[in-house]
Image (spheres, rainbow, N blue to C red):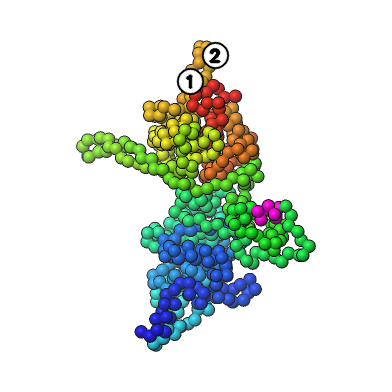
Amino acid sequence: MSDALRSNLRKLADREWRLKNLYKIRDENRQLINLDIDKFPNQRKIFDILKALGFRGIRIVIPKGRKMGVSTLFLILWLDDALFNENTTTCIMAHTKGDVQKLLNIVKTAYKHIPEQIELGDGAVWVKPKATISNKNELEFDQINSKIYVTIENRGDTNNNLHISEAAHIKDEDRILATIGSVPGAQFGSNISVESTCNGIGGWFHRIVTESEAGHSQFMLLFVPWFIIGKNSMTAPSDWIPGKTELDLQKKVFDRHGITLSKDQLFWWRTQKDLYGRLMDQEFPTFLEDAFLASGTLAFEEEYLRLIKTRPFKRQAEVEIDRKIPYSDGINVSVRNEKVRYNVDIFVEPKPGRRYVMGGDPAEGVNKDSSALEVYDVVTLEQVAEFVHDGIPPKEFAHVVDKVGRMYNMAVAAIERNNHGGTVLEELKLIYPNIYKRETFDEKSRKRTTKLGFITDSHTRDLILDEFGQLLRECNVIVNSAILRSELFTFITNEDGRREAKPGHHDDTIMASAIALKIARLPNSSAVIKPLT
Protein backbone atom coordinates (compact mmCIF):
# COMPACT_ATOMS: atom_id res chain seq x y z
CA MET A 1 0.00 0.00 0.00
CA SER A 2 1.42 3.33 -1.05
CA ASP A 3 1.81 6.25 1.37
CA ALA A 4 -0.74 8.22 -0.66
CA LEU A 5 -3.36 5.48 -0.36
CA ARG A 6 -2.65 5.02 3.31
CA SER A 7 -2.96 8.78 3.91
CA ASN A 8 -6.21 9.07 1.94
CA LEU A 9 -7.75 6.09 3.70
CA ARG A 10 -6.86 7.66 7.02
CA LYS A 11 -8.54 10.92 5.98
CA LEU A 12 -11.66 9.15 4.79
CA ALA A 13 -11.90 7.29 8.09
CA ASP A 14 -11.67 10.58 10.01
CA ARG A 15 -15.16 11.92 10.72
CA GLU A 16 -13.93 15.46 11.28
CA TRP A 17 -12.12 15.47 7.93
CA ARG A 18 -15.27 14.22 6.23
CA LEU A 19 -17.43 16.92 7.83
CA LYS A 20 -15.08 19.67 6.71
CA ASN A 21 -14.38 18.39 3.22
CA LEU A 22 -17.33 16.36 1.92
CA TYR A 23 -20.40 18.33 2.99
CA LYS A 24 -21.76 21.67 1.82
CA ILE A 25 -24.31 23.87 3.56
CA ARG A 26 -26.01 27.13 2.60
CA ASP A 27 -25.03 30.11 4.72
CA GLU A 28 -27.24 33.09 5.55
CA ASN A 29 -26.08 34.75 2.30
CA ARG A 30 -27.39 31.70 0.38
CA GLN A 31 -23.86 30.73 -0.59
CA LEU A 32 -22.65 27.13 -0.60
CA ILE A 33 -19.81 26.69 1.86
CA ASN A 34 -18.06 23.79 3.53
CA LEU A 35 -19.23 22.84 6.99
CA ASP A 36 -16.37 24.16 9.12
CA ILE A 37 -16.96 23.45 12.80
CA ASP A 38 -13.91 25.50 13.76
CA LYS A 39 -15.76 28.69 12.80
CA PHE A 40 -18.52 28.01 15.30
CA PRO A 41 -17.37 27.36 18.87
CA ASN A 42 -20.64 25.69 19.80
CA GLN A 43 -20.33 23.20 16.89
CA ARG A 44 -16.73 22.49 17.85
CA LYS A 45 -17.70 21.89 21.48
CA ILE A 46 -20.57 19.55 20.53
CA PHE A 47 -18.34 17.63 18.11
CA ASP A 48 -15.58 17.20 20.70
CA ILE A 49 -18.08 15.87 23.25
CA LEU A 50 -19.47 13.34 20.78
CA LYS A 51 -15.97 12.36 19.67
CA ALA A 52 -14.91 11.70 23.27
CA LEU A 53 -17.86 9.31 23.50
CA GLY A 54 -16.89 7.56 20.28
CA PHE A 55 -20.05 8.83 18.52
CA ARG A 56 -21.96 5.95 20.12
CA GLY A 57 -24.40 5.77 23.01
CA ILE A 58 -25.02 9.53 22.81
CA ARG A 59 -27.84 11.03 24.84
CA ILE A 60 -27.63 14.82 24.72
CA VAL A 61 -30.13 17.66 25.18
CA ILE A 62 -29.27 21.20 24.07
CA PRO A 63 -31.30 24.29 25.01
CA LYS A 64 -30.10 27.07 22.72
CA GLY A 65 -30.80 30.35 20.99
CA ARG A 66 -32.05 30.93 17.45
CA LYS A 67 -29.88 30.13 14.43
CA MET A 68 -26.97 28.60 16.33
CA GLY A 69 -26.18 25.91 13.74
CA VAL A 70 -26.96 23.05 16.11
CA SER A 71 -29.59 21.36 13.92
CA THR A 72 -27.35 21.60 10.88
CA LEU A 73 -24.46 19.93 12.68
CA PHE A 74 -26.54 16.98 13.85
CA LEU A 75 -28.29 16.54 10.50
CA ILE A 76 -24.95 16.18 8.75
CA LEU A 77 -23.40 14.08 11.51
CA TRP A 78 -26.19 11.54 11.31
CA LEU A 79 -26.23 11.65 7.47
CA ASP A 80 -22.52 10.89 7.57
CA ASP A 81 -23.18 8.01 9.97
CA ALA A 82 -25.72 6.54 7.54
CA LEU A 83 -23.38 6.86 4.55
CA PHE A 84 -20.29 5.40 6.18
CA ASN A 85 -21.91 2.66 8.27
CA GLU A 86 -24.04 -0.06 6.77
CA ASN A 87 -27.47 -0.93 8.18
CA THR A 88 -27.97 2.49 9.76
CA THR A 89 -31.37 4.15 10.08
CA THR A 90 -31.54 7.79 11.11
CA CYS A 91 -34.74 9.61 12.06
CA ILE A 92 -34.98 13.39 12.19
CA MET A 93 -38.09 14.50 14.08
CA ALA A 94 -39.48 17.92 13.16
CA HIS A 95 -42.06 19.81 15.19
CA THR A 96 -44.29 20.76 12.21
CA LYS A 97 -45.00 19.38 8.75
CA GLY A 98 -43.58 22.60 7.30
CA ASP A 99 -40.23 21.96 8.94
CA VAL A 100 -39.95 18.43 7.52
CA GLN A 101 -39.00 19.74 4.09
CA LYS A 102 -36.74 22.47 5.48
CA LEU A 103 -34.68 19.97 7.47
CA LEU A 104 -34.56 17.41 4.68
CA ASN A 105 -33.34 20.11 2.26
CA ILE A 106 -30.28 20.60 4.48
CA VAL A 107 -29.61 16.86 4.29
CA LYS A 108 -30.20 16.71 0.52
CA THR A 109 -27.97 19.72 -0.14
CA ALA A 110 -25.15 18.13 1.84
CA TYR A 111 -25.60 14.78 0.07
CA LYS A 112 -25.91 16.30 -3.41
CA HIS A 113 -22.53 18.06 -3.24
CA ILE A 114 -20.52 15.10 -1.98
CA PRO A 115 -18.11 14.11 -4.79
CA GLU A 116 -19.43 11.15 -6.75
CA GLN A 117 -16.14 9.39 -6.14
CA ILE A 118 -12.81 10.06 -4.46
CA GLU A 119 -9.54 8.77 -5.90
CA LEU A 120 -7.61 7.23 -3.05
CA GLY A 121 -4.51 6.03 -4.92
CA ASP A 122 -3.24 2.70 -6.23
CA GLY A 123 -6.43 2.44 -8.28
CA ALA A 124 -8.66 2.48 -5.18
CA VAL A 125 -11.78 4.63 -5.33
CA TRP A 126 -14.41 5.56 -2.79
CA VAL A 127 -17.83 5.78 -4.45
CA LYS A 128 -20.67 7.79 -2.95
CA PRO A 129 -23.60 5.49 -2.08
CA LYS A 130 -26.44 6.04 -4.51
CA ALA A 131 -29.76 7.29 -3.18
CA THR A 132 -32.21 4.70 -4.49
CA ILE A 133 -35.10 6.56 -2.89
CA SER A 134 -35.15 10.34 -2.75
CA ASN A 135 -38.50 11.94 -1.99
CA LYS A 136 -39.95 14.67 0.17
CA ASN A 137 -39.36 12.68 3.36
CA GLU A 138 -36.24 10.56 2.99
CA LEU A 139 -33.03 9.42 1.37
CA GLU A 140 -32.48 5.66 1.19
CA PHE A 141 -29.30 3.85 0.15
CA ASP A 142 -30.18 0.27 -0.75
CA GLN A 143 -26.64 -0.91 -1.46
CA ILE A 144 -25.60 -0.28 2.15
CA ASN A 145 -29.08 -0.79 3.67
CA SER A 146 -29.05 2.67 5.27
CA LYS A 147 -31.47 5.58 5.23
CA ILE A 148 -32.22 8.95 6.74
CA TYR A 149 -35.74 10.34 6.95
CA VAL A 150 -37.53 13.35 8.40
CA THR A 151 -40.94 13.02 10.03
CA ILE A 152 -43.21 14.51 12.68
CA GLU A 153 -43.74 11.12 14.38
CA ASN A 154 -42.27 7.65 14.48
CA ARG A 155 -43.44 5.47 11.60
CA GLY A 156 -42.44 2.10 13.01
CA ASP A 157 -38.75 1.95 12.14
CA THR A 158 -36.06 0.90 14.58
CA ASN A 159 -33.79 3.94 14.59
CA ASN A 160 -30.06 3.87 15.26
CA ASN A 161 -29.87 7.67 15.36
CA LEU A 162 -32.63 10.05 16.40
CA HIS A 163 -32.48 13.83 16.30
CA ILE A 164 -35.41 15.83 17.69
CA SER A 165 -35.45 19.39 16.39
CA GLU A 166 -37.19 22.21 18.30
CA ALA A 167 -38.45 19.75 20.88
CA ALA A 168 -39.90 22.45 23.14
CA HIS A 169 -42.41 23.30 20.41
CA ILE A 170 -43.76 19.75 20.10
CA LYS A 171 -46.89 19.85 22.24
CA ASP A 172 -47.78 16.15 21.98
CA GLU A 173 -45.49 14.52 24.55
CA ASP A 174 -46.71 11.04 23.59
CA ARG A 175 -45.39 11.63 20.08
CA ILE A 176 -41.92 12.34 21.47
CA LEU A 177 -41.98 9.36 23.81
CA ALA A 178 -43.14 6.98 21.07
CA THR A 179 -40.34 8.14 18.79
CA ILE A 180 -37.71 7.83 21.52
CA GLY A 181 -39.08 4.35 22.16
CA SER A 182 -38.09 3.39 18.60
CA VAL A 183 -34.40 3.72 19.52
CA PRO A 184 -32.57 0.75 21.06
CA GLY A 185 -30.76 1.29 24.36
CA ALA A 186 -27.53 3.28 24.52
CA GLN A 187 -25.64 0.03 25.19
CA PHE A 188 -26.34 -0.90 21.57
CA GLY A 189 -24.57 2.21 20.30
CA SER A 190 -27.71 4.17 19.41
CA ASN A 191 -27.75 7.97 19.56
CA ILE A 192 -30.40 10.51 20.59
CA SER A 193 -29.79 14.23 20.21
CA VAL A 194 -32.39 16.82 21.21
CA GLU A 195 -32.21 20.57 20.67
CA SER A 196 -34.58 23.49 20.89
CA THR A 197 -35.09 27.12 21.62
CA CYS A 198 -36.98 27.21 24.89
CA ASN A 199 -40.73 27.70 24.85
CA GLY A 200 -41.99 28.35 28.33
CA ILE A 201 -41.95 26.30 31.48
CA GLY A 202 -43.61 22.90 31.37
CA GLY A 203 -43.69 20.17 28.78
CA TRP A 204 -41.30 17.36 27.94
CA PHE A 205 -38.33 19.49 26.88
CA HIS A 206 -38.39 21.63 30.03
CA ARG A 207 -38.69 18.53 32.19
CA ILE A 208 -35.82 16.68 30.51
CA VAL A 209 -33.59 19.77 30.77
CA THR A 210 -34.44 20.12 34.47
CA GLU A 211 -33.82 16.42 35.15
CA SER A 212 -30.53 16.57 33.25
CA GLU A 213 -29.44 19.65 35.17
CA ALA A 214 -30.29 17.85 38.41
CA GLY A 215 -28.32 14.77 37.33
CA HIS A 216 -31.43 12.57 37.20
CA SER A 217 -31.50 11.82 33.47
CA GLN A 218 -29.63 9.70 30.97
CA PHE A 219 -29.28 12.86 28.87
CA MET A 220 -26.19 15.03 29.05
CA LEU A 221 -27.05 18.74 29.23
CA LEU A 222 -25.26 21.31 27.08
CA PHE A 223 -26.50 24.90 27.13
CA VAL A 224 -25.57 27.13 24.17
CA PRO A 225 -25.73 30.88 25.01
CA TRP A 226 -26.00 33.51 22.28
CA PHE A 227 -22.63 35.17 22.89
CA ILE A 228 -20.42 32.25 21.83
CA ILE A 229 -21.46 32.78 18.20
CA GLY A 230 -19.31 35.36 16.41
CA LYS A 231 -22.14 36.56 14.17
CA ASN A 232 -24.10 37.75 17.21
CA SER A 233 -22.32 41.07 17.15
CA MET A 234 -22.99 44.42 15.48
CA THR A 235 -20.70 47.38 15.03
CA ALA A 236 -21.77 49.91 17.60
CA PRO A 237 -22.08 53.60 16.64
CA SER A 238 -19.17 55.62 17.96
CA ASP A 239 -21.49 57.64 20.20
CA TRP A 240 -23.31 54.63 21.67
CA ILE A 241 -22.62 54.11 25.36
CA PRO A 242 -23.71 50.88 27.11
CA GLY A 243 -26.32 51.54 29.77
CA LYS A 244 -26.60 50.04 33.22
CA THR A 245 -28.53 47.01 31.90
CA GLU A 246 -25.78 46.21 29.38
CA LEU A 247 -23.00 46.76 31.92
CA ASP A 248 -24.76 44.55 34.46
CA LEU A 249 -25.09 41.86 31.78
CA GLN A 250 -21.40 42.19 30.91
CA LYS A 251 -20.39 41.78 34.55
CA LYS A 252 -22.71 38.82 35.07
CA VAL A 253 -21.33 37.00 32.02
CA PHE A 254 -17.77 37.63 33.15
CA ASP A 255 -18.50 36.46 36.70
CA ARG A 256 -20.16 33.28 35.46
CA HIS A 257 -18.10 32.43 32.38
CA GLY A 258 -14.91 34.51 32.52
CA ILE A 259 -15.84 36.08 29.16
CA THR A 260 -15.92 39.82 28.59
CA LEU A 261 -18.64 40.86 26.16
CA SER A 262 -17.39 43.45 23.67
CA LYS A 263 -19.11 46.75 22.99
CA ASP A 264 -20.30 45.38 19.64
CA GLN A 265 -21.80 42.31 21.33
CA LEU A 266 -23.57 44.50 23.87
CA PHE A 267 -24.93 46.68 21.07
CA TRP A 268 -26.20 43.61 19.21
CA TRP A 269 -27.86 42.40 22.42
CA ARG A 270 -29.53 45.79 22.94
CA THR A 271 -30.91 45.86 19.36
CA GLN A 272 -32.31 42.33 19.75
CA LYS A 273 -33.71 43.14 23.19
CA ASP A 274 -35.55 46.12 21.73
CA LEU A 275 -36.94 43.86 19.01
CA TYR A 276 -37.92 40.81 21.08
CA GLY A 277 -38.68 42.45 24.42
CA ARG A 278 -39.61 39.89 27.09
CA LEU A 279 -38.97 37.04 24.63
CA MET A 280 -35.27 37.93 24.34
CA ASP A 281 -34.24 35.48 27.05
CA GLN A 282 -36.20 32.74 25.30
CA GLU A 283 -34.97 33.41 21.77
CA PHE A 284 -31.37 34.34 22.65
CA PRO A 285 -30.73 33.17 26.23
CA THR A 286 -27.66 34.30 28.14
CA PHE A 287 -28.14 31.91 31.06
CA LEU A 288 -30.05 28.66 31.25
CA GLU A 289 -32.17 29.75 34.20
CA ASP A 290 -33.52 32.65 32.11
CA ALA A 291 -34.32 30.64 28.98
CA PHE A 292 -37.67 29.22 30.09
CA LEU A 293 -40.29 31.91 30.49
CA ALA A 294 -42.99 31.48 33.09
CA SER A 295 -46.68 31.76 32.27
CA GLY A 296 -49.70 32.31 34.47
CA THR A 297 -49.72 34.16 37.79
CA LEU A 298 -46.76 32.85 39.74
CA ALA A 299 -47.25 32.42 43.47
CA PHE A 300 -43.77 33.84 44.10
CA GLU A 301 -42.34 36.87 42.29
CA GLU A 302 -40.51 35.85 39.13
CA GLU A 303 -37.76 38.45 39.54
CA TYR A 304 -36.62 36.73 42.74
CA LEU A 305 -36.94 33.23 41.33
CA ARG A 306 -34.61 34.30 38.50
CA LEU A 307 -31.94 35.00 41.11
CA ILE A 308 -31.80 31.33 42.15
CA LYS A 309 -28.53 29.70 41.05
CA THR A 310 -28.69 25.95 41.32
CA ARG A 311 -25.73 23.62 41.34
CA PRO A 312 -25.20 19.90 40.68
CA PHE A 313 -25.28 17.56 43.64
CA LYS A 314 -21.85 16.83 45.11
CA ARG A 315 -22.61 13.15 45.36
CA GLN A 316 -25.50 10.76 45.77
CA ALA A 317 -25.79 8.90 49.06
CA GLU A 318 -27.22 5.43 48.65
CA VAL A 319 -29.86 4.39 51.18
CA GLU A 320 -30.43 0.63 51.44
CA ILE A 321 -33.72 -0.63 52.86
CA ASP A 322 -35.07 -4.12 53.54
CA ARG A 323 -38.38 -4.69 51.77
CA LYS A 324 -40.56 -7.65 52.79
CA ILE A 325 -41.87 -9.48 49.72
CA PRO A 326 -44.59 -12.17 49.87
CA TYR A 327 -43.30 -15.35 48.28
CA SER A 328 -45.00 -18.59 47.33
CA ASP A 329 -43.36 -21.86 46.33
CA GLY A 330 -46.68 -23.17 45.07
CA ILE A 331 -47.59 -24.70 48.38
CA ASN A 332 -46.66 -22.34 51.18
CA VAL A 333 -46.67 -18.57 51.33
CA SER A 334 -43.83 -16.89 53.18
CA VAL A 335 -42.10 -13.54 53.37
CA ARG A 336 -38.57 -12.83 52.22
CA ASN A 337 -36.40 -9.75 52.49
CA GLU A 338 -35.30 -7.91 49.39
CA LYS A 339 -32.79 -5.06 49.33
CA VAL A 340 -34.02 -1.86 47.68
CA ARG A 341 -31.83 1.16 47.16
CA TYR A 342 -32.63 4.84 46.86
CA ASN A 343 -30.33 7.76 46.05
CA VAL A 344 -30.28 11.01 48.01
CA ASP A 345 -28.76 14.10 46.39
CA ILE A 346 -26.11 15.66 48.63
CA PHE A 347 -25.33 19.31 47.88
CA VAL A 348 -23.43 20.11 51.09
CA GLU A 349 -21.85 17.51 53.37
CA PRO A 350 -22.96 17.54 57.03
CA LYS A 351 -20.78 19.58 59.38
CA PRO A 352 -19.97 18.34 62.89
CA GLY A 353 -22.10 20.05 65.53
CA ARG A 354 -24.31 21.86 62.98
CA ARG A 355 -28.10 21.69 63.35
CA TYR A 356 -30.22 20.61 60.43
CA VAL A 357 -33.93 20.24 59.81
CA MET A 358 -35.79 17.95 57.41
CA GLY A 359 -39.14 18.77 55.81
CA GLY A 360 -41.09 15.85 54.38
CA ASP A 361 -44.07 15.71 52.01
CA PRO A 362 -45.08 12.04 51.71
CA ALA A 363 -47.10 10.60 48.83
CA GLU A 364 -48.94 7.36 48.27
CA GLY A 365 -46.10 5.75 46.33
CA VAL A 366 -47.96 4.80 43.15
CA ASN A 367 -46.12 6.93 40.56
CA LYS A 368 -48.41 9.96 40.86
CA ASP A 369 -47.20 12.68 43.25
CA SER A 370 -43.69 12.29 44.58
CA SER A 371 -42.53 11.87 48.14
CA ALA A 372 -40.07 14.67 48.86
CA LEU A 373 -37.57 15.20 51.66
CA GLU A 374 -35.69 18.48 51.89
CA VAL A 375 -32.81 19.10 54.31
CA TYR A 376 -31.75 22.62 55.34
CA ASP A 377 -28.95 24.03 57.44
CA VAL A 378 -30.57 25.84 60.39
CA VAL A 379 -27.82 28.48 60.49
CA THR A 380 -27.46 29.37 56.80
CA LEU A 381 -30.89 28.20 55.55
CA GLU A 382 -29.07 26.47 52.70
CA GLN A 383 -30.62 23.44 51.03
CA VAL A 384 -28.05 20.72 51.74
CA ALA A 385 -29.78 17.52 50.58
CA GLU A 386 -32.85 16.40 48.67
CA PHE A 387 -34.74 13.19 48.04
CA VAL A 388 -37.58 12.98 45.50
CA HIS A 389 -39.20 9.74 44.40
CA ASP A 390 -42.57 9.05 42.77
CA GLY A 391 -42.83 5.37 43.65
CA ILE A 392 -41.56 4.88 47.19
CA PRO A 393 -44.07 3.34 49.65
CA PRO A 394 -44.76 5.40 52.80
CA LYS A 395 -43.02 2.99 55.21
CA GLU A 396 -39.87 2.94 53.07
CA PHE A 397 -39.95 6.73 52.93
CA ALA A 398 -39.79 6.67 56.75
CA HIS A 399 -36.58 4.65 56.56
CA VAL A 400 -35.08 7.15 54.09
CA VAL A 401 -35.92 9.93 56.58
CA ASP A 402 -34.22 7.91 59.33
CA LYS A 403 -31.02 7.33 57.35
CA VAL A 404 -30.77 10.92 56.10
CA GLY A 405 -31.54 12.36 59.55
CA ARG A 406 -28.76 10.31 61.13
CA MET A 407 -26.40 11.45 58.40
CA TYR A 408 -27.22 15.09 59.24
CA ASN A 409 -26.55 15.01 63.01
CA MET A 410 -29.97 13.64 64.01
CA ALA A 411 -31.79 16.44 62.21
CA VAL A 412 -35.30 17.14 63.40
CA ALA A 413 -37.79 15.47 61.03
CA ALA A 414 -40.85 17.63 60.30
CA ILE A 415 -43.08 15.33 58.25
CA GLU A 416 -46.45 16.49 56.95
CA ARG A 417 -49.06 14.48 58.82
CA ASN A 418 -51.87 14.77 56.28
CA ASN A 419 -52.96 11.75 54.22
CA HIS A 420 -50.11 9.23 53.93
CA GLY A 421 -47.98 11.17 56.39
CA GLY A 422 -49.68 9.28 59.22
CA THR A 423 -48.33 5.98 57.88
CA VAL A 424 -44.86 7.46 57.56
CA LEU A 425 -44.91 8.83 61.11
CA GLU A 426 -46.17 5.57 62.63
CA GLU A 427 -43.16 3.79 61.13
CA LEU A 428 -40.74 6.64 61.81
CA LYS A 429 -41.50 6.83 65.54
CA LEU A 430 -40.31 3.23 65.90
CA ILE A 431 -36.86 3.96 64.46
CA TYR A 432 -36.03 7.67 64.74
CA PRO A 433 -35.93 9.74 67.95
CA ASN A 434 -36.01 13.35 66.74
CA ILE A 435 -39.45 13.94 65.22
CA TYR A 436 -41.22 17.29 65.18
CA LYS A 437 -44.15 17.33 67.58
CA ARG A 438 -46.91 19.89 67.75
CA GLU A 439 -48.58 20.81 71.02
CA THR A 440 -52.35 21.21 71.01
CA PHE A 441 -54.86 22.27 73.67
CA ASP A 442 -58.25 20.57 73.95
CA GLU A 443 -60.82 23.12 75.15
CA LYS A 444 -63.22 20.44 76.39
CA SER A 445 -60.81 18.36 78.42
CA ARG A 446 -58.57 21.34 79.25
CA LYS A 447 -55.57 19.14 78.51
CA ARG A 448 -52.47 19.72 76.43
CA THR A 449 -51.37 16.95 74.10
CA THR A 450 -48.63 16.54 71.54
CA LYS A 451 -48.99 15.09 68.08
CA LEU A 452 -46.29 13.87 65.79
CA GLY A 453 -45.86 15.61 62.46
CA PHE A 454 -46.73 18.87 60.79
CA ILE A 455 -50.44 19.50 60.19
CA THR A 456 -51.06 21.34 56.92
CA ASP A 457 -54.40 23.13 56.97
CA SER A 458 -55.56 26.31 55.27
CA HIS A 459 -53.98 28.43 58.00
CA THR A 460 -50.59 26.72 58.33
CA ARG A 461 -50.29 26.22 54.57
CA ASP A 462 -50.65 29.93 53.88
CA LEU A 463 -48.32 30.73 56.77
CA ILE A 464 -45.42 28.56 55.63
CA LEU A 465 -45.81 29.61 51.98
CA ASP A 466 -45.85 33.30 52.99
CA GLU A 467 -42.66 32.81 54.97
CA PHE A 468 -41.01 30.87 52.14
CA GLY A 469 -41.88 33.72 49.78
CA GLN A 470 -40.41 36.25 52.20
CA LEU A 471 -37.15 34.28 52.39
CA LEU A 472 -36.98 34.21 48.57
CA ARG A 473 -37.62 37.95 48.30
CA GLU A 474 -34.98 38.76 50.89
CA CYS A 475 -32.51 36.25 49.37
CA ASN A 476 -32.20 34.61 52.79
CA VAL A 477 -32.57 31.03 51.57
CA ILE A 478 -30.12 29.17 49.34
CA VAL A 479 -31.80 26.85 46.85
CA ASN A 480 -29.43 24.37 45.20
CA SER A 481 -31.85 21.98 43.50
CA ALA A 482 -32.89 22.35 39.87
CA ILE A 483 -36.01 20.32 40.67
CA LEU A 484 -37.11 22.74 43.40
CA ARG A 485 -36.39 25.74 41.20
CA SER A 486 -38.42 24.19 38.38
CA GLU A 487 -41.38 23.58 40.69
CA LEU A 488 -41.24 27.20 41.88
CA PHE A 489 -41.71 28.34 38.27
CA THR A 490 -44.88 26.23 37.88
CA PHE A 491 -46.37 27.13 41.26
CA ILE A 492 -49.21 29.56 40.58
CA THR A 493 -52.07 31.39 42.20
CA ASN A 494 -55.28 30.06 40.69
CA GLU A 495 -58.52 31.95 40.05
CA ASP A 496 -59.72 31.20 43.58
CA GLY A 497 -56.55 32.65 45.11
CA ARG A 498 -55.13 29.28 46.14
CA ARG A 499 -51.43 28.70 45.57
CA GLU A 500 -50.81 25.36 43.89
CA ALA A 501 -48.92 23.58 41.12
CA LYS A 502 -50.12 24.14 37.57
CA PRO A 503 -52.09 21.19 36.17
CA GLY A 504 -49.67 18.41 35.25
CA HIS A 505 -46.95 19.72 37.56
CA HIS A 506 -45.88 19.13 41.16
CA ASP A 507 -45.25 21.11 44.35
CA ASP A 508 -43.81 18.34 46.56
CA THR A 509 -40.36 19.90 47.00
CA ILE A 510 -41.95 23.31 47.62
CA MET A 511 -44.12 22.05 50.46
CA ALA A 512 -41.29 19.99 51.96
CA SER A 513 -39.01 23.04 51.83
CA ALA A 514 -41.63 25.39 53.25
CA ILE A 515 -42.16 23.05 56.22
CA ALA A 516 -38.42 22.64 56.81
CA LEU A 517 -37.75 26.37 56.65
CA LYS A 518 -40.61 27.16 59.02
CA ILE A 519 -39.26 24.72 61.61
CA ALA A 520 -35.67 25.90 61.06
CA ARG A 521 -36.61 29.43 62.06
CA LEU A 522 -38.35 28.44 65.30
CA PRO A 523 -36.44 29.14 68.56
CA ASN A 524 -35.55 25.50 69.14
CA SER A 525 -36.12 23.29 66.12
CA SER A 526 -35.84 20.05 68.08
CA ALA A 527 -38.24 20.90 70.92
CA VAL A 528 -41.97 20.42 71.25
CA ILE A 529 -43.54 23.27 69.32
CA LYS A 530 -46.66 25.15 70.35
CA PRO A 531 -49.38 25.85 67.76
CA LEU A 532 -48.15 27.97 64.86
CA THR A 533 -49.37 31.54 64.70
Name the residue located 52 percent from the left edge and 23 percent from the top edge: 529
Local crowd at mark 1 within 10 Å, few (<14), some, or many (≥20)?
some
Name the residue located 52 percent from the left edge and 44 percent from the top edge: 481
- Residue 245's x, y, as percent? 71, 52
Local crowd at mark 2 within 10 Å, few (<14), some, or many (≥20)?
few
Quadrant of the image containing the N terminus: bottom left
Region in magenta: 245-251
Q: Secondary structure at mark 2?
A: loop
Say if the magenta span includes residue 156: no
Give the residue furthest to the right: 239
Q: Nearer the viewer, residue 130 or 10?
A: 10
Q: Is residue 214 above or below residue 48?
A: above
Q: Nearer the viewer, residue 469 or 367?
A: 469
Between disc 2 and disc 1, the foreground one is 1
The residue under label 2 is: 443
Name the residue located 70 percent from the left edge and 65 percent from the top edge: 234
Tell me the kind of residue under disc 1: Thr
Residue 511 visible? The answer is: no
Q: Which mark is residue 450?
A: 1
